[in-house]
């Protein structure tokens, strides 16, 4: 029987276990293969003894659909090419990974990861001549050539629910509520949550904005007879000057936790209303996976195993126009997919009168 390995790499998100379950079910039921789950991302193959588990159907039952996180564990900062050592130095441990792979005797590796993991694992697999298939995951939804990555739908639901909860308290207190969401360098969560949650202002890293523009929008809301406003800001946004919050802070004056707090402080100078900031943080990564994430994860898992069976290696499964397809990993490795400033989402936001900056 064929032996394959699977690992989860980079930041976790909801739906990873659903993908593991799909891979194991497809591989065992359809092909009669053995599936080895490697623990803690690439670390499980670098460790001696190797750190892995052999899956059977019972070990990945339907409860995996409902379970957030990853039962395999994952590490964020363990790049095998520059592995952080206890003394602060970096060591190239890529050969440990390759040796571990050979020791386990697997014939292909399924990697569930974002663009960064795709880049690193692809490089590792090339070095060792290891056949790899990728499954995209990240709440940021910025993996190239796929409309959806596992975890995004759940994160968006959490951000949307936060908007639903902020709206009534904003109204009660006549406040401006700023919700800072994750997304790293892109604004997928922000713009989607802003549209779905009825935001007046949405700020994303892809589109520059001015404090004036925000203040004008808030004044407009007031003139229309509403006593409160909702604002979503992506964590990756810079200040209005183009400098990051950290760079502004090194000037030595006020300290802000992040872009949300920075904006609240700056808007206090021009806007009369009271402002409050919510930084949503890692709640966006946890919890029970949304139905859409379970479906995408299941489809990706099944298709990834089929790719191995067909000998189509070095590919990543992707969701395009409602279908699962596959693309070369080299086309997605290390590349991020931003929001198109003139695409459907941005135009929808503008059409609704949301201030999304100036472009
Ligand atoms: O890439 C996923 C993500 O959750 C980003 O949205 C966020 O910026 C980052 O990871 C947080 O990383 P960490 O879990 O290391 O704090």
Image (cartoon, rainbow, N blue to C red):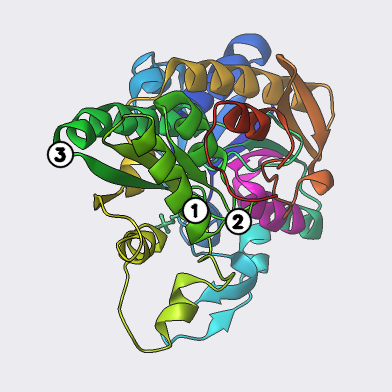
Looking at the image, can residue 1 be seen? no
| Residue placed under numbered mark 1 in the picture | 44
Q: Position of residue 265 (x, y in %)?
A: 31, 65
Q: Mark 2 Cα within 10 Å, few/some/many (few <14, many 20+)?
A: many
Residue 313 vs 264, above or below: the answer is above
Circle 1/circle 2 CB separation < 8 Å: yes
Give the label, 3 or 1, closer to the camera.
Answer: 3
Mark 2 element type: helix
Mark whose residue sits in front, 1 or 2: 1
Residue 306 within the segment the image draws in magenta: no
Ligand 1 neighbours mark 2 (CB distance < 8 Å): no
**On the rendered structure, is 238 left or right of 257?**
right
- For disc 3, the marked residue is 173
Estimate the spatial distance between the alpha carbons at disc 3 and disc 1, rounded to whole Å. Answer: 51 Å
How many labels were placed on the picture? 3
Q: Residue at x 79, y 43 (%)?
A: 329
The residue under the point 62% across, 52% down is 117
- Which residue in the protein does label 2 denote? 100
User: Which of the two discs, 3 and 2, labels the residue nearer the N terminus?
Assistant: 2
In x, y percent, where is residue 6? Answer: 57, 37
The residues colored magenta run 102-123
Helix, strand or loop at label 3? It is helix
Residue 254 location, x and y as percent?
Answer: 30, 79
Q: Is residue 112 above or below residue 257?
A: above
220 with respect to 27 (left or right): left
Q: Mark 1 or mark 2, which has the lower sequence index?
A: 1
């Amino acid at each position: 029987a064929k032996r394959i390995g699977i690992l989860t790499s980079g930041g976790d998100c909801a739906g990873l276990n659903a993908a593991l379950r799909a891979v194991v079910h497809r591989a065992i039921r359809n092909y009669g293969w053995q599936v080895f789950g490697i623990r803690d991302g690439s670390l499980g193959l670098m460790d001696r003894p190797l750190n892995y588990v052999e899956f059977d159907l019972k070990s990945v039952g339907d409860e995996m659909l409902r379970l957030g996180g990853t039962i395999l564990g994952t590490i964020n900062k363990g790049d095998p090419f520059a592995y952080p050592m206890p003394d602060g130095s970096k060591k190239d441990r890529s050969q440990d990974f390759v040796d571990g792979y050979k020791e386990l005797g697997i014939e292909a590796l399924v990697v569930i990861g974002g663009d960064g993991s795709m880049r690193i694992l692809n490089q590792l697999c090339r070095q060792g001549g290891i056949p790899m298939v990728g499954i995209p995951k990240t709440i940021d939804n910025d993996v190239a050539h796929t409309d959806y990555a596992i975890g995004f739908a759940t994160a968006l639901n959490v951000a949307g629910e936060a908007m639903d909860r902020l709206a009534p308290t904003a109204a009660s207190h006549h406040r401006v509520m700023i919700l800072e969401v994750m997304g790293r360098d892109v604004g997928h969560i922000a713009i989607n949550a802003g549209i779905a949650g009825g935001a007046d202002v949405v700020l994303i890293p892809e589109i520059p904005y001015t404090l004036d523009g925000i203040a004008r929008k808030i004044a407009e809301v007031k003139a229309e007879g509403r006593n409160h406003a909702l604002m979503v800001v992506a964590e990756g946004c810079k200040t209005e000057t183009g400098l990051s919050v950290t760079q502004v802070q090194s000037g030595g004056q006020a300290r802000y936790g992040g872009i949300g707090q920075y904006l609240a402080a700056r808007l206090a100078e021009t806007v009369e209303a009271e402002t409050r900031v919510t930084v949503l943080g890692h709640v966006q990564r946890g919890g029970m996976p949304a139905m859409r994430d379970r479906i995408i994860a299941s489809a990706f898992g099944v298709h990834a195993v089929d790719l191995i069976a067909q000998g189509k290696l070095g590919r990543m499964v992707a969701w395009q126009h409602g279908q699962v397809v596959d693309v070369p990993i080299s086309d997605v490795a290390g590349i991020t997919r931003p929001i198109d400033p003139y695409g459907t989402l941005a135009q929808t936001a503008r059409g609704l009168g949301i201030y999304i900056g100036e472009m």
